[in-house]
Amino acid sequence: MTLDLSPFVYKFKVNESTLCLYHSVTLKKVYMSFEEFDQLALKIKDNPLDEDVQRLKEFKFLVEEPYNKEAIFKALADSLLLKEPDPSISYIVLTGTCNFQCRYCYVENAIKKPNKLMDKATADKVIDIISRISEGKKEYKIIFYGGEPLLNKEIMYYIVENLEKKGNGGFNFGVITNGSLIDEKTAEYFKKHSIHVGLSLDGWKDLDANRQYKIGKETFYSTIRALGILNEHDINAAISCTVTKSNYLYLRKIVEFFYGLGVKGVGFNLILDSTNKDYAVEDPKLLAYYLFDAFKRTTELGMHEDRIEARRWKPFLEEKFKLYDCPAYGQQVFFSPYGTLGPCQAFFTTNEYQQPITKDFNPRTSGLLSTWLKLGGTLTSEECMNCPAIGICGGSCAYDIYTKTGKLGFIDRYFCTFINEILKYMIDFYYDTEIKKFNIHILTDKYISGLEELIRSLNKEEGQLMQINKIMPHIDNWIGYSMMANTKKLGVLNVAVENRTGKVIGFCNITRNNSEYVLGVAVAKEYRRKGVGGMLLSKTLEDTRKIGIRFINAYFNKKNLPSKNLLLKYGFSIDKEGDTEIKSYLEVEKLPDK
């Protein structure tokens, strides 16, 4: 028996000392040092029963040779791919008409037939089909779309109320709107019928300039007004933000701007034709970088984000293979105001990939939906089999491929580059947030407010290896002095920051107090016994030696055994013991080299 790394396992460098072994199909990841990886090869050869070897074999990172990759891939596809269309979501395009004329809009800029409002006769057919195909499902999503769907809100309300009367109970209604037609009555209706709202907005006013009324007037304030009305009615609208050349560099700040407006969710939309040089971000690597940076900011702020979090990070975290990125491949049916239906609402502007709405429509036997199902995902492509990102991809946008080639079923190289960059960022981010959960930073302006918040939370505690109560009355001066000491190399103050949230969870400082240098360490209560104090102390002592400080004293409460053990571990010796306090000291020069 010969063991070797599975052909589905890829190596990623995380930092100078760490690598990640990532399984592209199971989405499992194992982090180890480069030294451990070199030792692994010896263990596989000389000691195949070693615990580490057996664990990697159990995870299918190590496989027995010969290994038929193609057969495994085919078996995976046969077991996971949908066998027939089974929609759980419908887009209802109420009209192609819009009172805006956004410069990048694929609807108005591509529509090839006269605009039309969906009428009641068509709506009745839609209601009948949806009530039939949703039967037995716990949830069926319905998204009203346009154009601007609220230009035809009477039909929207008609569909909502009639589907509610059908009694299936599992309908989840949503609407994507520019917000300009939202008033108090509309908001009341949305609230009464639990209709989720997605508002289109691309950032603050200057960045929102691509969205405009047909007369050329800006639209920013009408959307802000709508957001205010929805907030007053306790409707947590999500923002639908289109990423363009104009705003992609500012996505992190845009997230913060939305957060300041009280928004709890954001979805980033990509230009559907990535060859559109006027608006699309031309470099997919840059697009991936700024989108992922924005996602990280949403996690820090506790916001929901769709493009990365829901569609990439969630399957990566849960280790669930992503079959399809777009529900148009077998899981969706859209209805147009022209009396047609099809798998993808983006095509309603054309005459392609649609069929008439008929009462006997059955998605499971629809030739059109079945054809799309066979084209979707990544498990239908042998080329995708050799891609590290296959498990988080789900395939690219059908409409984007169509605009480039005039056909479906091709691989989009732009998207391939984008998704592989996202995978690399996720592997690093997982290491930072799930493996190495925090980092140590020198105190800068960025962390001052977080440090102040931490010190206030610790003020009432006793037994800290730090006299917090003496800092509190002079906290601003103390922080100011510590930053000055950092800058002039007269002392050290480092903070521990949780990678996922950006929260300051501990600090360690060495400050001159009269004739001695005194050490202080403090860690937030919920983060103790997790190695935070040790990492803080280790980094701070390393920095202390670099600036030439020779001796350090540390004082701690006699009852504080964790502090005593921590100091002894890092080379401190007991100097004096009082009734309640112990003094310890460290000769920095005698610390072993790193």
Image (cartoon, rainbow, N blue to C red):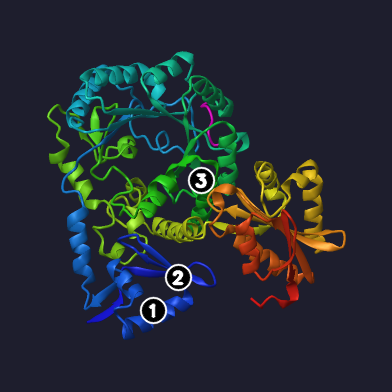
Name which residue type carries label 3.
Answer: Thr
Please name the residue that numbered disc 1 is placed on. Answer: 40
Looking at this view, is 485 or 106 the one in front?
A: 485
3D distance between C-alphas at marks 3 and 2: 26 Å
Task: Point out the tag, 1 or 2, that comes first from the N-terminus.
Answer: 2
Please name the residue that numbered disc 3 is placed on. Answer: 299
Secondary structure mostly taken by the magenta-highlighted segment of the chain: loop
Looking at this view, is 550 or 234 the one in front?
A: 550
Looking at this view, is 399 or 228 the one in front?
A: 228
How many neighbours does mark 1 have within 10 angstroms: few (below 14), some (14-19), or many (20 or more)?
A: some
Residue at 70% across, 56% down: 556
3D distance between C-alphas at marks 1 and 3: 35 Å
Badge number at residue 476: none
Q: Marks 1 and 2: CB-CB under 8 Å?
A: yes
Task: Point out the tag, 1 or 3, that comes first from the N-terminus.
Answer: 1
Name which residue type carries label 2.
Answer: Met
Say what secondary structure mark 2 lies in. strand
Residue 211 magenta-highlighted: yes
Where is residue 60 drawn, in percent x and y? 28, 68
Where is residue 574 drawn, in percent x and y? 71, 67
Name which residue type carries label 1.
Answer: Leu
Q: Which residues are magenta?
A: 210-214
